[in-house]
Image (spheres, rainbow, N blue to C red):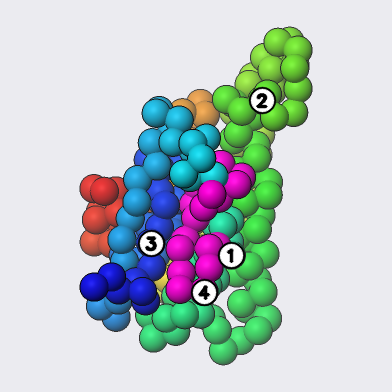
């Protein structure tokens, strides 16, 4: 019999849905809550097929199927997971201001950093002329460097007692930051120029939940 309480994540390799996959792995590790991952192949155009558009009409990932309905957009999914499984302690749920700070950071990644990255190969969302597309593509390394300099200097302390985005405690924001930081090399930016970010990246890669999510 199908487990109606088991969450299903629609995930595509190399995309921001990795953050949700990591978070589900963290939850499984801490609570035993099972989930399934349904692959969406962008190479095969699965995101444009009627079967997937019936799940997410935006034709993007992630999408999270719950017993109450479908959720899309990474910040919403991460907050939902943290609130659904409070025992996993993946967000500061008991402090509304700090939780809002977490949401501010996640929305910055979603609305600004991800968009800057998308100008490298999704420029057709904003322009038609090839010269415009070329300009957007050329601007990506500069923009990503500027944005990650802000993250390096504002959100990462670099201290041993505050190794995560929110300080001492690991949260869903760390999974999200790691996911987008994985794109830097392809965007023409060497992560090594950001010592704090690079250290955070390596800490993330040592987490079993991250390793399991990547192996998927």
Query: In the image, which is nearer the foreground, mark 4 or mark 3?
Result: 4
Mark 2 or mark 4, which has the lower sequence index? 4
List x then y, in percent, for residue 191. Answer: 45, 39
Q: Which residue is mark 1?
A: 76
Instruction: Tell me if label 4 and label 3 are in contact, CB under 8 Å.
Output: no
List x then y, in percent, for residue 108. Answer: 66, 54
What span is colored magenta in the figure?
A: 54-71
Q: Secondary structure at mark 3?
A: strand
State the CA–CA distance, disc 3 to disc 2: 31 Å
Q: Which residue is mark 3?
A: 8
Instruction: Tell me if label 3 and label 1 are in contact, CB under 8 Å.
Output: no
Instruction: Tell me if label 4 and label 1 are in contact, CB under 8 Å.
Output: no
Q: What label does residue 123 carry, if any? A: 2
84 versus 177 height, above or below = below
Mark 1 or mark 2, which has the lower sequence index? 1
Instruction: Tell me if label 3 and label 2 are in contact, CB under 8 Å.
Output: no
State the CA–CA distance, disc 4 to disc 3: 12 Å
Query: In the image, which is nearer the foreground, mark 4 or mark 1?
Result: 4
Q: Secondary structure at mark 2?
A: helix
Residue 146 visible within the image: yes
State the CA–CA distance, disc 3 to disc 1: 15 Å
Mark 4 or mark 3, which has the lower sequence index? 3
Q: How many marks?
A: 4
Instruction: Tell me if label 1 and label 2 are in contact, CB under 8 Å.
Output: no
Q: Nearer the viewer, residue 197 or 68?
A: 68
List x then y, in percent, for residue 183. Answer: 47, 37
Instruction: Tell me if label 2 and label 4 are in contact, CB under 8 Å.
Output: no
Q: Secondary structure at mark 4?
A: loop
List x then y, in percent, for residue 25. Answer: 31, 65
């Amino acid at each position: 019999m199908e487990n109606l309480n088991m969450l299903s994540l629609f995930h595509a390799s190399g995309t921001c849905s990795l953050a949700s996959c990591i978070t589900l792995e963290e939850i499984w590790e801490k609570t035993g809550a099972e989930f399934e991952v349904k692959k969406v192949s962008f190479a095969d155009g699965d995101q444009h097929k009627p079967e997937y558009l019936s799940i997410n009409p935006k034709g993007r990932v992630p999408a999270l199927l719950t017993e109450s309905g479908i959720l899309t957009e990474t910040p919403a999914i991460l907050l939902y997971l943290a609130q659904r499984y409070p025992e996993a302690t993946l967000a500061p749920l008991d402090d509304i201001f700090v939780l809002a700070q977490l949401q501010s950071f996640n929305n910055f990644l979603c609305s600004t950093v991800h968009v800057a990255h998308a100008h490298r190969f999704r420029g057709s969302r904003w322009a038609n002329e090839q010269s415009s597309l070329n300009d957007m593509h050329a601007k990506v390394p500069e923009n990503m460097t500027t944005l990650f300099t802000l993250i390096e200097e504002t959100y990462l302390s670099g201290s041993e007692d505050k190794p995560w985005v929110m300080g001492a405690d690991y949260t869903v924001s760390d999974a999200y930051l790691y996911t987008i930081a994985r794109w830097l090399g392809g965007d023409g930016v060497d992560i090594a120029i950001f010592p704090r970010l690079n250290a955070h990246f390596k800490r993330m890669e040592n987490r079993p939940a991250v390793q399991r999510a990547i192996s998927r």
